[in-house]
Image (cartoon, rainbow, N blue to C red):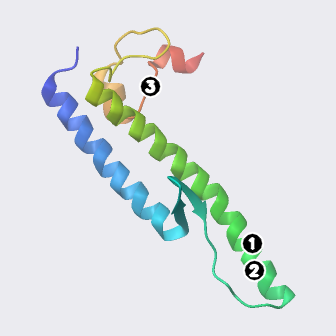
C-alpha cells in the first residue's frame, strides 16, 4: 500500500501536470461544454487564407486531442486519489509499483498488464 507521503507527492505532480496541460490547451483551443475544441485565427476570405486556416485547424485538432486525452488520464488519477483507489492496476487489481507511478503518475495498469 502506498504511504500517504507518496500519495501526496504524486498528487502534487498530477496537479502540476494538469495545470500545464490546461495552459497548453487554452492556447490552442476553446473550452465548450467541458471539452476543448481546436481554434484557428481568421486569416481572411480568399482561398489562400482559407487554406491556411484549414491547415492550422487540422494541426491543432491532433494536438488538442492528445492533450485532452492526457488531461483526462490525470483527472481519473486524481479522482482515484480522492476515493482511495489510486495505485492499483485496473486489470489485475495488484498494486502498481511506486517507481512506475513516479515515472507516470497517471498509470492505471501495472507493467505486466500494460505489456499485454
On residue 111, the disc is none
Q: Name the residue located 66 percent from the left edge and 59 percent from the top edge.
A: 61
Q: Label 2, on which residue?
A: 52
* Element type where label 3 sits in the image: loop
Q: Residues within 10 Å of mark 1 (few under 14, many from 20)?
A: few
**Vertical relation: 90 (above or below) 59:** above
**Vertical relation: 18 (above or below) 10:** below
- Quadrant assignment, res 105: top left
- Quadrant assignment, res 102: top left
- Expressed as whole percent of the image width and height from the top left, the position of residue 28 reads 54, 68
On residue 108, the disc is 3
Left or right placement of residue 38 versus residue 43 in this view: left
Identify the residue at the far right of this view. 47
- Expressed as whole percent of the image width and height from the top left, the position of residue 64 reads 58, 57
- Quadrant assignment, res 60: bottom right
- Expressed as whole percent of the image width and height from the top left, the position of residue 99 reads 31, 26
Q: Label 1, on which residue?
A: 55
User: In the image shown, does 29 or 2 lie closer to the viewer?
Assistant: 29
Quarter of the image for the C terminus: give it: top right
Identify the residue at the far left of this view. 5
* Element type where label 2 sits in the image: helix
Q: Are marks 1 and 3 in contact (CB under 8 Å)?
A: no
As measured in the structure, the alpha-carbon distance from the residue carrying label 2 to the one carrying label 1 is 5 Å
- Expressed as whole percent of the image width and height from the top left, the position of residue 89 reads 42, 16
Q: Are marks 2 and 1 in contact (CB under 8 Å)?
A: yes
As measured in the structure, the alpha-carbon distance from the residue carrying label 1 to the one carrying label 3 is 35 Å
Q: Residues within 10 Å of mark 3 (few under 14, many from 20)?
A: many
Mark closer to the chain start, 3 or 2? 2
Mark closer to the chain start, 1 or 3? 1
Amino acid at each position: 500500500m502506498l504511504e500517504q507521503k507518496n500519495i501526496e507527492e504524486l498528487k502534487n505532480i498530477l496537479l502540476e501536470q494538469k495545470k500545464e496541460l490546461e495552459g497548453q490547451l487554452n492556447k490552442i483551443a476553446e473550452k465548450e461544454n467541458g471539452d476543448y475544441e481546436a481554434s484557428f485565427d481568421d486569416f481572411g476570405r480568399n482561398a489562400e487564407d482559407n487554406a491556411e486556416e484549414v491547415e492550422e485547424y487540422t494541426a491543432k485538432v491532433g494536438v488538442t486531442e492528445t492533450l485532452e486525452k492526457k488531461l483526462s488520464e490525470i483527472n481519473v488519477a486524481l479522482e482515484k486519489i480522492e476515493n482511495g483507489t489510486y495505485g492499483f492496476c485496473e486489470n489485475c487489481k495488484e498494486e502498481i509499483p511506486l517507481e512506475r507511478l513516479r515515472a507516470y503518475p497517471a498509470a492505471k495498469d501495472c507493467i505486466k498488464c500494460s505489456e499485454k
